[in-house]
Amino acid sequence: MFNKKLQEIRKSRGKTQKEIAELLDVSWITYQRYELGKSEPNIQKLLSISAILDVSLDVLLCRDEFLAEHADEY
């Protein structure tokens, strides 16, 4: 879920994987693994991704969708 959201947001911002990887100071392969769901960024990288893509962590981590689906449980 996170990986698909990350890819969707990146593309909507007109950024390439390589551009984001450079801004995060990680290899392109590392960033690609995030989008493929083969690896997940640590909290520092998540915060950086959030800032780079100008999106909240709730949206990036699909928390907003989860809460909307389970609103009656909270």
Image (cartoon, rainbow, N blue to C red):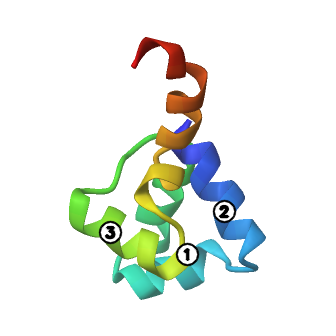
Asked where in the image residue 18 lies, by quadrant, the reply is bottom right
Q: Give the CA separation, mark 3 to mark 2.
A: 15 Å
Quick one: label 3, few (<14), some, or many (20+) residues within 10 Å? some
**Residue 16 in picture, x, y percent from top left:** 67, 77
| Residue 1, placed above or below residue 20 | above
Q: 27 or 57, which is in the foreground?
A: 57
Residues at circles 3 and 2 in contact by the CB criterion of under 8 Å: no
Q: The residue under label 2 is which amino acid type? A: Ile
Q: Which residue is mark 2?
A: 9
Q: Which residue is mark 1?
A: 53
Q: Give the CA separation, mark 3 to mark 1.
A: 10 Å
Q: The residue under label 3 is which amino acid type? A: Leu
Helix, strand, or loop for circle 1? helix
Mark number displayed over residue 68: none
Helix, strand, or loop for circle 3? helix
Please tell me which residue is depicted at 39% across the width and 19% down the height of the picture. 74
Quick one: label 1, few (<14), some, or many (20+) residues within 10 Å? some
Q: Which residue is mark 3?
A: 47
**Left or right position of 40 against 60:** left
Q: 64 or 46, which is in the foreground?
A: 64
